[in-house]
Image: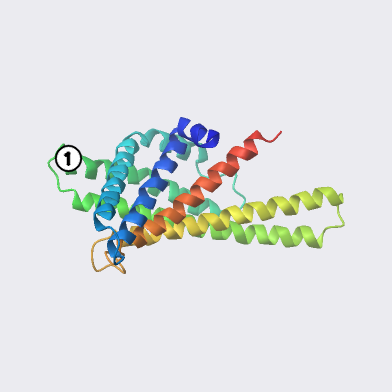
Amino acid sequence: MEAVANALESYRGRDRLVRTMCYSSRLLGGLLLTSTGSRPELGRRLLLVSQELSNCRAVLRLFDDLSMYLYSREYGLGTTEEDAIVRLLSITVNLADQLYYPCEHLAWAADYKILSIKSDKWWTLSNSLWAVSLALGALRSFRVVQLLQRRLRGSQNEGYVGSKESNSLSRRTYRIRMRAEVLNIVSSLADLANAVHWMPPGFLWAGKFPEWLVGLMGTVSSAIGLCQMSCRSDSAKDP
């Protein structure tokens, strides 16, 4: 209970919890609608809750442009990265994320008649930028895993150099980072599946996912995000 309360105190923590509730409601609601002998009315209510939570997150993202800009500016051209591929992928992901927000804001404003424009093309553009960010993010994590595997093999082959304790600690650090990157890949691919589903009809599997499958993909991604946030919080508490 204390961990949940602490998470709700921060914007990112609250967003992750709301996201998890959004997709889990969609998953359960979709299952209730498709299962025979279930309660379809409850399923429809859960889908409505999911939609309202999604709308809530969209409104809160109206204020994310500045934080994204500061993050991109801090990363810059990635001069601290040792690998050129990781650097290029990271810069492109940051650019796609930065462009995503204004496109979504325009689509949101069009839906609410604040702007006299059609929202469809802006939703498609923002969703496309999200898909590009997810795909490149997964590739970036895959590349990082490759680099970490090389370092791990190198530390094992050169285990006689330095103390046994330091070599063991280095290998443990590499394995922890590898697991984190693998989870990033799974999370990105799960969200990418949904991003393609929300593309215009005719593009791959666009529009073909049932509600429960959309909820499942989002729940998997959200659960991974919550787990990673919890692990980072625990690491920060360690002396």
Q: Residue at x 34, y 45 (%)?
A: 99
Residue furthest out toward the left = 116
Tell me which residue sits at (64%, 39%) in the image: 235
Q: Is residue 75 left or right of residue 153?
A: left
Which percent across, then down, holds residue 10?
47, 32
Q: Is residue 208 above or below residue 217?
A: below
Residue 181 position in % (x across, y down) = 57, 55
The residue positioned 61% from the left and 56% from the top of the image is 179
User: In the figure, is residue 235 to the left or right of 167?
Assistant: left
Type of amino acid under label 1: Tyr
Q: Which residue has dot 1 on it? A: 112
Residue 197 shows in this picture: yes
- Choose between 31 and 210: the one closer to the eye: 31
Q: In the image, residue 38 lies at what x, y percent?
A: 30, 61
Left or right placement of residue 148 versus residue 156 in this view:
left
Q: Quadrant of the C terminus?
A: top right
Frontmost residue, 146 versus 25: 25
SS at circle 1? loop
Say which quarter of the image contains residue 190. Answer: bottom left
Front residue of 36 and 87: 36
